[in-house]
Image (cartoon, rainbow, N blue to C red):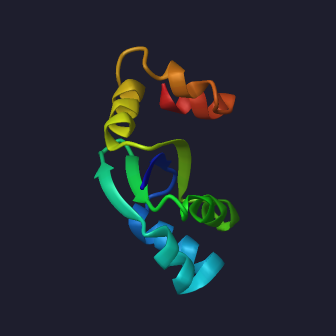
Amino acid sequence: YRYVVAVVEEDVEPLTAIRRAVLELSGIMGLAAVMPEIVYANERGYVIVRVSRGGLPLLRAALAAYGKCPLRVLKVTGSLRKARSMIQGIEGVGGANRLDANLPDSSAKALS
């Protein structure tokens, strides 16, 4: 599996939005290939989504092709422990700078 650290952009249920995006792009076979599962979510809108390793490119394509992108992928990692530490780093004091380097200016300010 791969663990996708993302932030929810809209007021939607993340798993439903992911499933809808993948179904729209590639149908039920694509959804079976991705196998998305929310393993962590917090009140600030950060989620960790577990996906199959082979389905990761399909998930990224589905989120990009979906009309209004419900999630913004911040980072992808191979372990749940690393994904949790990334979220703690984002929310911790001074930890946001690690991921802000890859974000546009407006997104970096929103996370701070």
- Residue farthest toward the top in the current orientation of the protein: 94
Q: Give the percent coordinates (x, y) of residue 95.
A: 43, 19
Q: Quadrant of residue 5?
A: top left
Query: Is residue 71 shown above or below 103?
Result: below
Q: Residue at x 49, y 31 (%)?
A: 111
Side of 83 where 101 appears, left or right: right
Side of 19 where 60 appears, left or right: right
- Note whether residue 13 is visible: no
Query: Is residue 17 shown above or below 57?
Result: below
Q: Residue at x 30, y 50 (%)?
A: 40
Q: Residue at x 62, y 59 (%)?
A: 57
Q: Give the percent coordinates (x, y) of residue 19.
A: 48, 73
Q: Quadrant of residue 105?
A: top right
Query: Is residue 52 shown above or below 41?
Result: below
Q: Give the percent coordinates (x, y) of residue 17.
A: 48, 68
- Note whether residue 11 is visible: yes
Side of 12 where 70 appears, left or right: right
Q: Give the percent coordinates (x, y) of residue 20.
A: 52, 75
Query: Is residue 34 shown above or below 102?
Result: below
